[in-house]
Image (cartoon, rainbow, N blue to C red):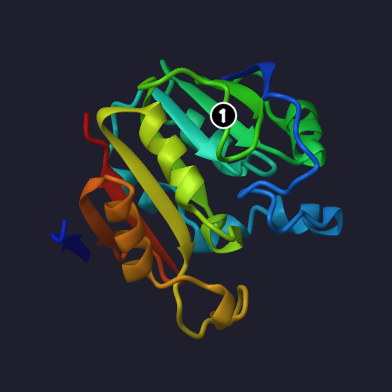
Amino acid sequence: MTMLIGYVGRVNRTLTSRERSNEWSSMSAHRFDPAKLGKLNDVGRLVDLDPDAIWAAFGVPDARTAVEIGAGTGMFAREFADRMPEGRLYAVDSEPVMIEWMHEHLDHDLPGDIVVTDADAGAIPLGDTIADLVYSINLHHELDDPTQMLAEAHRLLRPGGTVAIVDWKREATPKGPPIEHRIAAIDIAEQLSAAGFVDVTIHDALKYHSVVTGKATA
């Protein structure tokens, strides 16, 4: 079920962002605990976060350029690059341990091209209107203020391109963060609308997660 909100491969290089300040950015509000790296890379996550269901909800079967913000170990970058055999996917993360992991562990013979990109969510060193899809998975609830990230997503997207936020539903589930740390899908939808996205839609594609999409304007 979807709800339309009407109120409104190869790992070939690393891109580095500008030198980071000592202040915490919107993406690094909650710094990653390296002890959790194995959990992030557990293929069992693909049961609850089914890549086929997520990709279908994104609604961009012919995407040629995608950006994942908060790519982590690159698990989903690998899945979606496989669905973009002629495309390019920028796997963005600000954690050195993640950048190193992706370089060491991502396959070098994927059909699609993955570019590991070292950057904060609000300052991604890519040109304007380059992407058909910008998405994040289980990142949104970690951000103190998503405004900068959403503005950056809008900048990166071509007119009509898709932004997609996948995150935990704000309801009791047998796994995941405490409810008080989660953001309701309707609130994410309102944030997308406030950031200038149109055709904002909540997709009930996953058991424990919401998928919220919107379209970039010119």
Residue ID for mark 1: 124
In this rendered view, identify the residue nearer to me: 174 or 8: 8
**Whole-percent x, y for residue 159 in the image:** 24, 28
Instruction: Residue 51: tell me if it is visible.
Output: yes
Residue 215 placement, left or right of 41: left
**Whole-percent x, y for residue 216 in the image:** 27, 37
**Whole-percent x, y for residue 81 in the image:** 49, 29
Specify the quadrant of the image occupied by residue 21. top right
Residue at coordinates 58% horizontally, 58% vertically from top-left?
Answer: 143
* Dot 1 amino acid type: Ile
- Figure quadrant of the N terminus: bottom left
SS for callout 1: loop
Residue at coordinates 38% horizontally, 47% vertically from top-left?
Answer: 164
In this rendered view, identify the residue nearer to me: 215 or 57: 215
Instruction: Residue 82: tell me if it is visible.
Output: no
Residue 26 vertical placement versus 20 (above, below): below
Residue 169 vertical placement versus 172 (above, below): above
> Which residue, as the protein is rendered here, is positioned at the far bottom?
172
**Whole-percent x, y for residue 22 in the image:** 80, 42
Residue at coordinates 30% horizontally, 66% vertically from top-left?
Answer: 204
